[in-house]
Image (tube, rainbow, N blue to C red):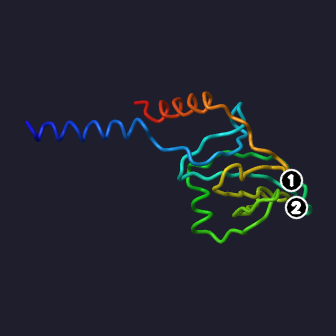
Amino acid sequence: MVALFHCFKILIVAFVGDMIGSTISLLCYSSFFQQQYEECDDSDYCFFLEDYPILDPTDTQNHARSCERRGYCKTLVENLNGKILTKYGLTHKCGTFMANEKTYADLCCCNYNWCNRLKVNELPLVMDSKKMKRNRARRWEERNEI
């Protein structure tokens, strides 16, 4: 009976732990969501990707930004010899890639709140706690669908 109770207690702890899921520890601007930000897990990075002509690196275009969850930023930060660049007033680790014959692309990664801004004076987005809770619940449901 005691062993059965102990197993049941472990099962409850495991279930509750799965329900809680990862904590949100990083907030990133996002090009892909209507609310223009994304709540990221502690193992994610914020990123931005921008193109520029080879002859004029200051003419950036085609910006995309969000949370990076596939491991590209982790590889860039931990394993590749990327450049440490200050862009838009913040420090990032960036990798430069040739997009085509005339265009380069920079993938820049960082892991602190709102670090993927695209303007020096861009302010963090204001979020209300109800919206954050709804988004957290929606993400938990998406992760735990069978």
Label 1: how many Cα within 10 Å (few below 14, some 14–19, many 20+): some
Horizontal and vertical percent position of residue 129: 61, 32
Q: Residue furthest left?
A: 1
| The C terminus: image quadrant | top left
Numbered mark located on residue 60 in the image: 1
Nearest the viewer among 78 and 140 is 140
Disc 1 to disc 2, C-alpha distance: 7 Å
Dot 1 and dot 2 residues touching (CB under 8 Å)? yes
* Among the 4 quarters of the image, the one containing residue 92: bottom right
Q: Give the left or right position of residue 11, taking residue 18 as reference.
A: left
Residue under label 2: 57
Instruction: Give the image location of residue 3, x and y in percent.
Output: 11, 41
Instruction: Tell me residue 14's x, y (percent).
Output: 31, 41
- Give the answer, above or below, for where 138 lies relative to 90: above
Residue at x 72%, y 46% (from the top left corner): 65
Q: Secondary structure at mark 2?
A: loop
Q: Nearer the viewer, residue 93 or 102?
A: 93
Q: What residue lies at 56% left-to-right and 31% top-to-bottom?
A: 133
Name the image quarter holding the N terminus: top left
Identified at 58% across, 68% down, the residue is 79
Image quadrant assignment for residue 107: bottom right
- Tell me the amino acid under the disc marked 2: Pro
Identify residue type, mark 1.
Thr
